[in-house]
Image: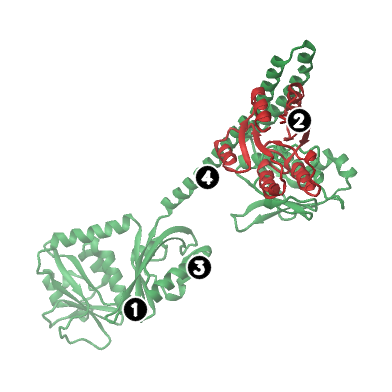
Chain colours: A green, B red
Amino acid sequence: MTESALKEKLIPNSEYCYWELNDNTSYWSKAFINNLGYQPNDVTIKLDFFLNNIIHEDYRAHFKDNFYNLVRHDVDFKQNVLLLSKEGKYLEYVCKTNDDINIDSKENSKTIFFFKSKLNTHEKVRGGTFYYHETAMMTSTGSWYIDFEKKKSYWDHITRKILEYPEDFIPSLKMGLKLYAKEHQALAKTVFMECGMSGKPFDVEILMVTAHNRKFWARAMGKPVFNDSKEIIGLRGVFQDIDDVKQKEINLEKTSEIIASQNSRLFNFAHIVSHNLRSHSSNLSLIVQLIDDMDSIEEKLELMDNIKDVSDSLNTTIEHLNEVVTIQTNADQHREKVNFAATLNQVCTSISQIISTNNVTILPDFSEVKDVDYIPAYMDSILLNLLTNAIKYKHVDRDPIISVKTFVDFKDNDRVVLEIKDNGAGIDMEKFGDKVFGMYKTFHYNKDAVGIGLFITKNQIESLNGEIDVDSILNEGTTFTIKF
Amino acid sequence: MNDKIKLACIIDDDSIYVNLIRKIIETKKLCDNLLVFNDGKDGIEYFETILQNLEDEFIPEVILLDLNMPVMDGWEFIERFTAIRNKIKKTITLYVVSSSINQSDIAKAKSLSSVKNYLVKPVEIDQLEAVFTKTA
């Protein structure tokens, strides 16, 4: 910088330490330079020089925020700073923008005064600012302010940082909802409106979107700012980046859901085992009582037939239970790409006899989703069970028409959904809704109803973290919906 | 006084159990006739039908009712049976006979005014004899 240029930016005849800001240029008073022990030649009268060489680093970012807010938005500020003297010591100053001191300043110019702090709060303030700054940095907490009167919003540098906007980015009120993920814009609108209209403070966990379009979880807190006549003139608050914690929380929630569902399946299974085995054991015990009670050998031998019956049905039960246990152990079996159309074909071929005798029409539509990662044997079994179910419980007055289609559920993380819909007899949902998938529950008069198929199907689906739901209208038909 | 029960009713889907009970009843001559229904729906339809023609000989004095049954379970039967039993003058004693040892099932059954008692399967022959004589 040349001598003349330097002089131009120097305000010579004033006893006050201050800067005058005008037309994108900073002018420093000579007293400001001298006060720190410098000669005009020692310094470059530029903001960058001040930030890099004079102000203590702990105060740098804060001062920069304040400076830009003053220049761009006319926001006054008052801040403590530590400035490096020529001797190499940091001296404590208070800088403020509005003061009654009468200086000869140009029109439209802005002023920042530097007053040497008289109180010896030096270390305390320094410490305080340091800790404040560290806390904000380490907890990723940025502050913001919305000024209703000037219709402007302000961010500190940490807010810019967590939202991934450049350091000199100037937020505008218009961006408002863009900062939030689509699914949370309504929430953001509500809390900000309520805070602005009725002064209700808020503290919410919300998905925000950065400048680079990255979604992250934030905790947003805000409260109203009042003027002297108790009117709300703005909102201030903080955004805290809580993505790490929130992701862990979400994972934990998922894990606990999985564990809870496994636990309930196990509990259910234990209940089934005890109940189903009990009925056989009690029959056996009745037989034994009878044998004891009978007098003639012939009568006793007659009861042997009953033992055979019990033994047969006990075997069947054990086979069913075994099938259920296998599902649990199979859950970690290898998954591979399973093609819906191919699987359906295979299943239809295996039951072609039943399909033709019952005059069944099957309408497949896999145009939206063609395949899914799954255990092939399970897909076979699920389709087989649901198709045979639909045929078995067809409506007496019409031939079965079964539509099988796949789609993507946009509302639920784009999960693949398989829907199997029939025009059969239907199930009375009010009576049986909660029992459809229970073991040995049948709702029809068919003699061959066993009540094991849907139970197995549900267990297979749930062991792979899927869901199955049923909806049905009596005499109209039944729809099974499976989410993979 | 005639002690013997004329007509008893079993509502249960376990055919082995039903056959064994039948055998005990026959051997011990606990009653003259036995009505058997495989589920609650068949059972309740019978009672709803005899309301049209309330002849003593068609009304069982004892009902042994299972809980877990297809189509209509024991609970629903009790509910619908309770709704019509006032129309029948004859005393009908209802026992729940189930293999469920679930405490909440037992407590629920015993809390119902229509249910005389809850018997856990397997029933003892003595128990059965007591049921058939107590009510007489």
Q: Which residue is mark 4?
A: A257
Query: Mark number for residue A233?
Result: 1
What SS does tag 4 mark? helix
Residue A228 shown left or right of residue A360 in the figure: left
Mark 1–mark 3 distance (CA, rounded to whole Å): 23 Å
> Where, by quadrant of the figure, is residue A97 drawn?
bottom left
Reply above or below: A441 against A242: above
Q: Are marks 1 and 3 on the same chain?
A: yes
Query: Mark number for residue A186?
Result: 3
**Badge 2 local density, few (<14 within 10 Å), some, or many (20+)?**
few
Mark 4–mark 3 distance (CA, rounded to whole Å): 27 Å
Type of amino acid at the residue the image marks with label 3: Ala
Q: Nearer the viewer, residue A188 or A136?
A: A188
Mark 3–mark 2 distance (CA, rounded to whole Å): 60 Å
Chain letter of the residue carrying label 2: B
Q: Are marks 3 and 2 on the same chain?
A: no
Mark 4–mark 2 distance (CA, rounded to whole Å): 40 Å
Q: Are marks 4 and 1 in contact (CB under 8 Å)?
A: no
Q: Nearer the viewer, residue B72 or B84?
A: B84
Q: Nearest to the eye among marks 4 and 3: give it.
A: 4
